[in-house]
Amino acid sequence: MATIEHESASVHAEARIQKVLESKETELNLSELDIETLPESLSKASGLKWLNLSGNNLASLPDWLGTMSGLQTINLLGNQLTMLPDSFAGLVNLQWLSLSNNELAALPKWLGSLASLQTLNLSYNRLSDLPESFATLAQLQTLYLVGNSLAKLPDSFGNLSSLQSANLSYNHLAGLPKSFGALAGLKTLTLSHNLLTALPESINGLTGLKTLWIDGNQLATLPDSIGGLTSLETLWLEDNRLTSLPASMANLAHLQMLNLSENRLKVLPEWIGGLTALQTLNLAKNQLGTLPPQLQDLKLRHLYLHENQGLGLTDEIVHAHADVPSILDYFFRLFPSGSKHR
């Protein structure tokens, strides 16, 4: 039965390849065919620019695939690849490459020679480190490394000067290299669910950053330099170990969403009232016993205060005062000083 299914998959693949060869189309979709090897006839499709090989059973790739230098997009998501052929270094026009959901344990040094690469997806492999040559991908704009086993990033990571979006969540990162601050063009950074205990002071170099996710780490403090992220609009710090916030965060004038839930905050600083762009503030599951009156100066659309027992606000009270002005009015009428303990 397996042999018949394999032969059927090969027949379907050959039919699609022949159609492309006859029509001279530049796109070929061989996804979800369960093929285990690539038909050699594919090597004749020298005009291909777009190739989808996702959702197959490919454990290796033929050397000749690397000679198809016209390719600009290759999708290899969801195969069983453990390595890439050295000939891939010849794909000098490749702009988009997905190797997500494979079995890659290491990346070749030549990866940095893919000079035209703009988007690279390496999520859900078995990578534990990146080669130093990785940082020579000068045109790389979007990077996905979700769900690997990365414990550190190369010191040269900051050389990815074109990088605009990076998702490094669900790894084992305990820190970031100082060079990270050189990524001035970065707009979105996701570091969720790692082992970070600190952020580098150089983080203030990320002057273009608009969205930062650092939830699910082990941060007990934030560097003063975080106040230099003056373009930041979304900051997600849920599920860390924060007991205080640096005063420099008062400079985050464009911040619209701030998630501080599941930390160890006992006091919210008064400068919070100066974040006039703030629309959503999540303070749930902390240890707050007081709120600053300056909260009332904000035009919040959403405010989450549940599971802060020290505030004296039961879940029933919070739900009964669904809108922000209502719950704050209730709290400060009940506790004019901002705390039930005064």
Image (cartoon, grey):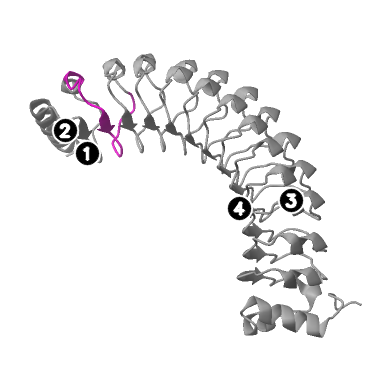
Please tell me how crowded label 2 is: few (under 14), some (14-19), or many (20+) other residues with Cα within 10 Å. many
Dot 2 or dot 4, earlier in sequence: 2
Q: In this figure, which residue is indicated by the disc labeled 4?
A: 233
CA–CA distance in space, label 1 to label 2: 7 Å
Q: In this figure, which residue is indicated by the disc labeled 2?
A: 13
Q: Which residue is at the front of the view, 175 or 22?
A: 22
Q: In this figure, which residue is indicated by the disc labeled 3?
A: 251
Dot 4 or dot 3, earlier in sequence: 4
Q: Are marks 4 and 3 in contact (CB under 8 Å)?
A: no
Dot 3 or dot 2, earlier in sequence: 2
In the image: residue 224, left or right of residue 187? right
**253 lies above or below 36:** below
x and y, in percent, of residue 52 in the image: 27, 35
Q: Nearer the viewer, mark 3 or mark 2?
A: 3
CA–CA distance in space, label 4 to label 3: 12 Å
x and y, in percent, of residue 152 in the image: 64, 30
Q: In this figure, which residue is indicated by the disc labeled 1?
A: 33
| Helix, strand or loop under label 3 | helix
Dot 1 or dot 4, earlier in sequence: 1
Give the amino acid type for the residue marked by disc 3 in the picture.
Asn
Q: Nearer the viewer, mark 2 or mark 4?
A: 4
Give the amino acid type for the residue marked by disc 4 in the picture.
Glu
Q: Residue at x 52, y 20 (%)?
A: 136
Give the amino acid type for the residue marked by disc 2 in the picture.
Ala
Q: Nearer the viewer, mark 1 or mark 4?
A: 4
